[in-house]
Amino acid sequence: MRMLLTVIGVIVLIMGLVFVGQGSGYFPYPATSFMVDNSVWIYYGGAIALAGLAVIVFAGRFSRR
């Protein structure tokens, strides 16, 4: 269970970082994406990345019980 939660947390964290990168224009792929250079996605991506980090931390604490 710990490994599954960790993998899910890492995937969600990476998704959030990609959203931040696209929203800020540092990761403009695909070039026709509606997210590129749209600052709203920086905030959404940050929230998603924090959620992924929380899942990773929870997975680490879950296994110690």
Image: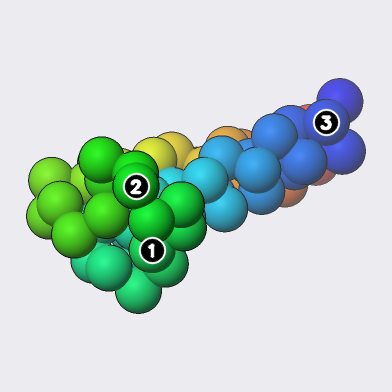
Residue at x-position 27% and y-position 45%: 35
Q: What residue do we see at 46% from left, 52% from top?
A: 30
Q: Earlier in the sequence, mark 3 or mark 2?
A: 3
Indicate whether 44 appears above or below 1: below
The residue labelled by disc 3 is: 4
Q: Which residue is mark 2?
A: 32
Q: Amino acid at mark 2?
A: Thr
On residue 28, which mark appears? 1
Q: Mark 1: few, some, or many residues within 10 Å (few <14, many ≥20)?
A: some
Mark 2 to mark 1 CA distance (whole Å): 8 Å
Q: Which numbered disc covers residue 15?
A: none
Residue type at the position of mark 1: Pro
| Residue 16 in view (yes/no) | yes
Q: Work out which quarter of the rendered image holds the N terminus and state it.
A: top right
Circle 1 sits in a helix, a strand or a loop, which is it?
Answer: loop
Q: Residue at x 38, y 63 (%)?
A: 28
* Foreground label between 2 and 1: 2
